[in-house]
Amino acid sequence: MLTPTVENTLKAIYDFGGYATTEMLCAWRPEVSRSYQAKVLQILTLEKYLVTRPNLRYGNMPKVYQVTGKTCALYGNPNSYRKSVHNETYVRRSLLRSLFLFRLVGSGYPYEDILASNEDRVNLLQQMAVQPAGLPAKMIYGERSIQIEEYILRKSPGSGGEGLTILHTHKPGFSPRKQLYSLCERYAEISETLDPPPSVYVVCEHEGDAAAYLRAAKNRSGSITSNIEVCSLGADLNTAQKQQKSGSNL
């Protein structure tokens, strides 16, 4: 039986994509000691709610934690992709998003304003009069399935402005311009329906990619690209992981 504090930590890791490090939890709850957060992760690992994954860039020390099938089943999604073994690019992208979200909530942003599941995103947008045909979708086994991959925030994490924000995490190795334009196409009808239209917040690993998104936004007119914010967290993520390598046995 997990204590409420430990279970709340597990739920946050699951909600934010399934990956976490000790430093991310410290950013989420800075008033709690690092040793306590490390203990929570150890408890969840011993109970098989988490597994350690090797740090793919800095060697084979197990410093990154990932949710397991047991966790996914606990939250009603036993077949969730969060439990799968992912490649390095996927893990890095997930860690960047997790770091951003843990920091965001740690800075005072309301946890409940982060729509972490596809179901919650779809329900909210339909409540706001967006028709199913206008929602992002994929073809699965020949059928159209609504899939909103980006996290939806109820207000801007940067300016704090009203209106929804689409949180996009850059895919390493792919063109920022093409990713932004694809985002615009997938959310075109949502942008036309909502007033105010949604803004976009892009999380990147490198500053060069963040700058490329801003350049791409200037070269394409539209309500989404007119309200875009970016940040780069790669240096912070790498620093945290190096600190783990030199100062922790997790």
Image (cartoon, rainbow, N blue to C red):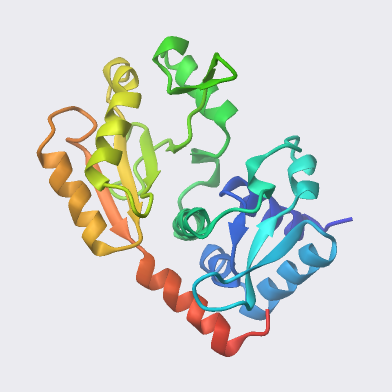
Q: Is residue 126 above or below residue 209?
A: above
Residue 163 location in percent, x, y? Answer: 33, 31
Residue 84 location in percent, x, y? Answer: 66, 48
Q: Is residue 96 left or right of residue 186?
A: right
Question: What residue appears at the point 26 percent right and 47 percent down from the top-left corner?
Answer: 176
Q: Is residue 217 left or right of residue 83?
A: left
- Note whether residue 17 is visible: yes
Question: What residue appears at the point 73 percent right and 68 percent down from the top-left corner?
Answer: 40
Q: Nearer the viewer, residue 4 or 70?
A: 70
- Note whether residue 131 is visible: no
In the picture as drawn, the residue positioned furthest to the bottom comes out as 246
Q: Quadrant of the N terminus?
A: bottom right
Residue 39 location in percent, x, y? Answer: 74, 74
In the picture as drawn, the residue positioned furthest to the front comes out as 142
Q: Write down the quadrant of residue 87 in the picture.
A: bottom right
Q: Write down the quadrant of residue 193 in the picture.
A: top left
Residue 245 location in percent, x, y? Answer: 56, 84
